[in-house]
Image: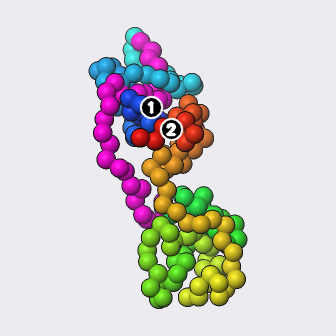
Amino acid sequence: MNFKALILNLDYTPVAICTVQRAFLLVYLRKAILLEANSTFALHTVNETYSMPSVIKLNRYVDIPYKKVVLNRDNIFKRDGFTCQYCGNTKELTLDHLVPKAKGGKTTWNNLITACKTCNSKKGNASLEETGLLLNIKPYRPSYIMYLKDLSGNNYEEWKPYLDTKNIRVA
Ligand SMILES: [Zn+2]
């Protein structure tokens, strides 16, 4: 299995996700310390058993340039929980421009929404007001932290406290 580890900066802010092998190496080279080990699995060599890193913290502060989540179909779906934001359908998903392209609507986080085929065609080239469709969320640009959180799914219990935005100090 391909396990991943969460890398935290010196101040505990999440910076990246890497393979367990890389995390192990960073700890081994003393560039990072192990904060949380995978609770179920361990790494085995012929003679030894090592904890499998799940969360590691870097030993020095690294300046991370502001990371943007790439605007694409998959990431819009991910932001919207793979659910039509009009009716809650989870099948036959498409991207809908809130302000239709034909009316000058842009391809941006704020103008794109996950919509099922039915709602999308109901909406057509009309604006929201014209169709009377109700939107579940106000579309937004997800933060990198939120994106990491989504990626973590339910498989990484150990990550949760570190990805909880309440615990994250914003520099
Ligand atoms: Zn729908």
Q: Note whether residue 36 is visible.
A: yes
Secondary structure at badge 2 equals loop
Q: Which quadrant of the figure contains the C terminus?
A: top left
Q: Is residue 53 magenta?
A: yes
Towards the viewer: 63 or 95: 63
Check disc 2 and report the residue beneath it.
168
Q: Position of residue 39 (x, y in %)?
A: 57, 24
Chosen colour scheme: rainbow
Residue drawn at 31 percent across, 24 percent down: 31
Badge 1 is on which residue? 12
The amino acid type, in three-letter code, at marker 2 is: Ile
Label 1 amino acid? Answer: Tyr
Label pair 2/1, CB-CB below 8 angstroms: yes
Is 75 on the left-hand or right-hand side of 121? left
Q: Which callout, 2 or 1, points at the residue further toward the start of the chain?
A: 1
Q: Residue at x 55, y 70 (%)?
A: 113
Q: Nearer the viewer, residue 51 or 167?
A: 167
- Residue 33 in picture, x, y percent from top left: 39, 21
